[in-house]
């Protein structure tokens, strides 16, 4: 192949990339600055929080300390809203698995045997996931009266060294 | 060695010429190119419209220093938008050009070849190579994160997303090869 073909293609590719950099920086300059100052994670958490407040406004939430208190009281049933393989690997001790979308499982035991007034604490993987809120919302809609979503996620629970269990 | 190289180059040229002159293969390739451009334009648009969500996905890979996440999240959508747009426009022009030339209008020839098609395909090949590498590293590190691909639904980084990337990489590289000028013969050995 002629060298000039390659050079020409690469030169134009470079020009198009410069154009993309220019448009990207101009359009998203505030975000670029936020990230440069290291404030992006905090800002993202705030954005997530406000989005959740609107999207899941009917769902009560608990933090790590409150979740532990509920766990220690022993009445609450913990619901793991992650995928079955993650649940099998490690989960909060005593939790049962209910990935979002697997709603058929709710028509079968153990779900049919759980009293509607039993406190339920739903969690997913980390602070960033919405699955705990999705599952909590669904359980509320099914008539469970005391549903709460623990938003710290399994990662925070595990990092704090609280009781976990595995199926493996 | 020199003979073998010339032979290979000749085979390449011949294959390319046959492919280009077949109406069905040509139409199929145009459709593939149109699809590739459309997918990238759509993916770029999704990321562009939700920049912070994309930034969160970039951060999830835990490969870049915090300071650079913003630049990547701002620029990648524009790379996809520009290349996707030019490819779509170029291949649509190709369809129109082929129709006009088939009708005997010579002006249709000006619409063939696309708008900086080879450069766009080079960029996409490079982009997909980087994405694939990043995903392989992520799977090897055992991270379970959203891929941030910006397509119809959220997907986790895994074998499916990696194969999808590889497929696009091969397609972009193949379209680039097909779009190379026809008469090149100065092979350096």
Image: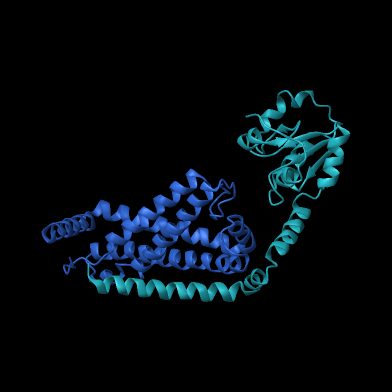
Which tint was used for chain A?
cyan
At 74% across and 24% down in the image, what residue appears? A110
- Shade of chain B as shown in the rendered figure: blue
Which residue is at a point 76% across and 39% down the rendered structure image? A122
In the image as oriented, which residue stretches furthest toward the right? Answer: A73
Image quadrant for the N terminus of chain B?
bottom left
Residue B107 in percent (x, y) is at 26, 72
Q: Position of residue A37 (x, y in %)?
A: 68, 72
Identify the residue at horizontal 64%, vertical 32% (top origin).
A88
Q: Name above or below for residue A91 compared with residue A26.
A: above
Q: Is residue A122 above or below residue B12?
A: above
Q: Image quarter for residue A124?
A: top right
Pick the residue in front: B78 or B89: B78
* Res B184 quadrant in image: bottom left
- Numbered-mark total: 0
In this view, the residue farthest toward the left is B3
- Is residue A12 left or right of A4 when viewed as pictured? right
Quadrant housing the C terminus of chain B: bottom left
Front residue of A152/B89: it is A152
Q: Position of residue A112 (x, y in %)?
A: 76, 24
- When asked about the image quadrant of residue A87, the answer is top right
Task: Indicate left or right for A127 with B164 as reference.
Answer: right
Q: How is the image coloured?
A: by chain
Residue B75's x, y, as percent?
A: 53, 68
Q: Is residue A146 visible?
A: no
Task: Judge from the rendering whether residue A79 lies leftward or rightward of residue B24; answer left or right.
Answer: right
Instruction: Judge whether residue B132 can be spotted in this image.
Output: yes
């Amino acid at each position: 192949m002629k060298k000039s073909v390659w050079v020409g293609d690469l030169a134009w590719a470079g020009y198009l990339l410069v154009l993309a950099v220019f448009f990207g920086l101009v359009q998203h300059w505030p975000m670029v600055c936020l990230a440069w100052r290291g404030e992006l994670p905090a800002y993202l958490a705030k954005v997530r929080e406000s989005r959740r407040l609107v999207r899941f406004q009917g769902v009560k939430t608990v933090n790590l300390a409150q979740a532990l208190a509920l766990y220690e009281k022993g009445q609450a049933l913990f619901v793991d809203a992650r995928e079955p393989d993650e649940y099998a690997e490690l989960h909060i001790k005593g939790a049962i698995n209910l990935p979002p979308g697997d709603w058929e499982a709710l028509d079968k035991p153990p779900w049919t045997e759980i009293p509607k007034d039993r406190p339920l604490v739903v969690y997913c993987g980390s602070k960033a996931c919405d699955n705990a809120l999705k599952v909590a919302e669904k359980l509320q809609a099914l008539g469970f009266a005391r549903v709460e979503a623990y938003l710290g996620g399994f990662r925070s629970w595990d990092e704090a060294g609280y009781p976990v269990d595995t199926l493996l | 060695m020199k003979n073998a190289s010339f032979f290979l180059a000749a085979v390449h040229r011949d294959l390319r010429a046959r492919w280009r002159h077949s109406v069905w293969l040509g139409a199929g390739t145009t459709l593939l190119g149109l699809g590739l451009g459309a997918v990238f334009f759509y993916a770029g648009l999704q990321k562009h419209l939700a920049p912070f969500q994309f930034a969160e996905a970039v951060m999830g890979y835990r490969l870049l220093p915090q300071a650079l996440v913003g630049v990547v999240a701002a620029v990648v959508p524009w790379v996809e938008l520009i290349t996707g747009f030019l490819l779509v426009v170029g291949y649509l022009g190709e369809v129109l050009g082929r129709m006009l030339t088939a009708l005997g209008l010579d002006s249709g020839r000006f619409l063939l070849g696309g708008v900086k098609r080879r450069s766009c395909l080079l960029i996409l090949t490079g982009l997909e190579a980087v994405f694939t590498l990043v995903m392989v590293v992520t799977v090897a590190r055992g991270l379970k994160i959203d891929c941030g691909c910006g397509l119809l639904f959220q997907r986790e980084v895994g074998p499916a997303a990696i194969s999808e990337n590889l497929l696009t990489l091969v397609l972009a590289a193949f379209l680039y090869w097909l779009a190379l000028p026809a008469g090149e013969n100065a092979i350096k050995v």
